[in-house]
Amino acid sequence: LKKFFSGLQCTVLLLDDRTTAKVDLQIQSIAHGVITMEGLPRDFGVRRRRLEIKKLRGTQYREGYHDYIIETGGLDVYPRLVASEHPQNETRPTPISSGIKELDELLGGGIDAGTSTLLMGPAGCGKSTIAIRYALSAADRGENAVIYTFDETSAIMLHRAKGLGLDLAKHIKSGRIQVEQVDPAELAPGEFVYRVFHQVHQRDAKVIVIDSLNGFLHAMPGESILTMQMHELLSYLNQQGVATIVTLAQHGMMGTSMGSVVDLSYLADSVILFRYFEAQGEIKQAVSVLKKRSGAHERAIRELKFQNGTISVGAPLKQFHGIMTGVPQLAAAKDAGR
C-alpha cells in the first residue's frame, strides 16, 4: 500500500484512534511521519490538548509537546517557543522610569529594558498597582504595553487604577495599552505564550505585565513545567529588549513565614519585595529591592502609600528595626534597651 501511493505521488493520512491497549509500532515504522495528539483532563476547566511530532523522515522539526485548541474552522496550534531561534536585540539596556521618583531611586534609576522584574508580596500590598504604573509610564513615552490580568476583571482593574490617579482609558483608546483578561480554566499555556509573542512581534510591545503568576500556574500541569516555560519566555522577552513585570502573591499577610506556591526569584533579573508592617496602631506597607542584576540599587526599606488618589514612596525607614517581621521596633527604643 505504501509503495502504491508513493508511485502516484499521493500524500496519505492514516488515522488511529488508539482504542486498543497495544500500540502498533510496526505501522509507525513504515510511515514517513508520526504525529500523536492527546487530551489531558484537568480537575476544572477545559481539557488541555497537545500534540507531538515523533517522527518525520528527511525533515527538521521541532521536538517536544505543542499545545493546540479546537475551534470553529479547525485547529490553532501553538509551537513551543525557543528563545535561541530569535535574533537578540544588541542595543544597550536603558533605564525605564515608573513615574515615581523615589521608587526609581530605590531601583538605582529604574528597571532596565530587556530585563524581567518580579514583584513579590502578600495579597493587596500594591504589586498590581506598581505594575500598572510602569505600563502607564511606557504609554506616556509613546511605547506600547500589554497587561495580562488573571486575578481580576479588566473593568475592576481600570476602576481601581483610576481611583489612584492612573488613567489608563486614554491610552487604551489610542491602542498604546492593551488589557487582556485571561481565564486560566480556559487557557492552554502555549496559547498564552503565543499571545505574548504576537504582542512583541506584531505590535512591538516594550512593557509586558503578567498579573499574576499564581493565575498562570493554574493553567499549567505542574510547577516544574511552569519554571521551564517561564524561563524560555523571559529569555525571549529579554532578547527583544522588553521590560517584563511579573507579580507573585505570597501566602500569609505578615511575619517572616511568608511562602510562595512557586519560586521564580532566581529567574528574574530584579526582585521587588512588598511587606505589611504595624506602626503606631496602623497597618502600613513597605517596599524594598532584594536583587538587581543589571546594576546597583538601594538597600533601604521605604514606606509605600496609596491615599488621596496618589501613589507615594517615602524616605528610607531608618527609625525602625525588624520591618520584615511585621512588628518593628523604634531604633531609639531598641538602642536604649541595649
Image (cartoon, rainbow, N blue to C red):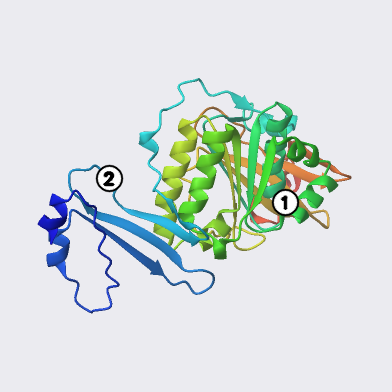
At 56% across and 54% down in the image, what residue appears?
213
> SS at mark 1?
strand
Quickly name the residue at label 1: 329
- Residue at the right extreme of this rendering: 308
Front-most of residues 49 and 114: 49
Would you place residue 215 above or below residue 9 in this image? below
- The disc, 2 or 1, on the residue closer to the chain's N-terminal end is 2
Front-most of residues 276 and 36: 36
Residue 79 lies left or right of residue 109; in this view the side is left
Residue 156 lies left or right of residue 216; in this view the side is right
Front-most of residues 307 and 51: 51
**Tag 2: residue type?**
Tyr
At 61% across and 25% down in the image, what residue appears?
95
**Tag 1: residue type?**
Gln
Quickly name the residue at label 2: 61
Check disc 2: other Cα within 10 Å, few if <14, some if 14-19, many if 20+: few
At 34% across and 63% down in the image, what residue appears?
37
Would you place residue 37 above or below residue 202 in this image? below
Task: Give the quadrant of residue 153.
Answer: bottom right
Check disc 1: other Cα within 10 Å, few if <14, some if 14-19, many if 20+: some
